[in-house]
Amino acid sequence: MKQGCIFCNIAHGIMESVTLFENLEFRVILDKFPAAKGHVLILPKEHIEDIYELDAETAGKIFALATIVAKAMREVLACEGLNVLQNNGEVAGQTVHHFHLHLIPRFEQDHINISWPIQELSDDDLETIGQAISKQI
Ligand code: 5GP
Ligand code: ZN
């Protein structure tokens, strides 16, 4: 647990949250400033800052939990779609530096905008960057 970390405090039940589920490793809560009614966050109880600190086993468990929560959300909210979102670094929109997965229910005309301008990249550029990353995996 990291001193002063808001999600450590919430995950350990020191700060209040609307909790949907909890076990030894995770807490599933409602986002207090949601993009939509029923916007869910999945938090590990351990202070993991971002995806780079997340081990593969914990990542697997978080996503397994997300599949269950997503189905419950679809059932209850009757959402037509759902975004799974996870931000790393301020430039990517991370405001709380304790790993969390967003589950955002989506509806027609909900005015949520998750989009980006398409970059013009040549086949050569695609090949070069693809190979460079591939070598590091
Ligand atoms: P990020 O921008 O880091 O990906 O997401 C942080 C999320 O945490 C935001 O969607 C924000 O609304 C939510 N949030 C910030 N403070 C609190 C809080 O005190 N309680 C809850 N439940 N959510 C919070
Ligand atoms: Zn934390």
Image (cartoon, rainbow, N blue to C red):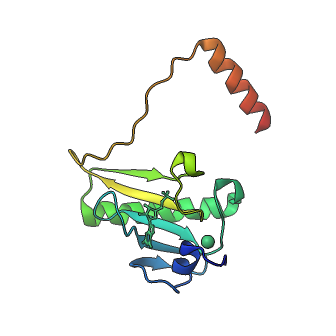
Residue 94 lies, with reference to residue 76, above or below; the image says above
Q: Position of residue 105 (x, y in %)?
A: 32, 56
Q: Quadrant of residue 26?
A: bottom right
Q: Quadrant of residue 50?
A: bottom right
Residue drawn 56% across the image and 17% down it: 121
The extreme bottom residue here reads: 14
Q: Would residue 57 appear left or right of 80 to someone viewing this image?
A: right
Q: Position of residue 14 (x, y in %)?
A: 53, 86
Query: As rendered, which of 23 and 87 lies closer to the eye?
Result: 87
Residue drawn 65% across the image and 62% down it: 49
Residue drawn 50% across the image and 50% down it: 93
Quadrant of ligand 1: it is: bottom left
Q: Quadrant of residue 68?
A: bottom left
Q: Would residue 39 appear left or right of 79 to someone viewing this image?
A: right
Q: Position of residue 30 (x, y in %)?
A: 39, 70
Query: As rendered, which of 25 and 53 lies closer to the eye?
Result: 53
Residue drawn 45% across the image and 58% down it: 102
Residue 130 lies, with reference to residue 66, above or below; the image says above
Q: How many marks?
A: 0
Q: Position of residue 123 (x, y in %)?
A: 60, 13
Location of the N terminus by quadrant is bottom right
Location of the C terminus by quadrant is top right
Q: Would residue 110 appear left or right of 99 to someone viewing this image?
A: left
The extreme left residue here reads: 109
Q: Would residue 106 appear left or right of 49 to someone viewing this image?
A: left
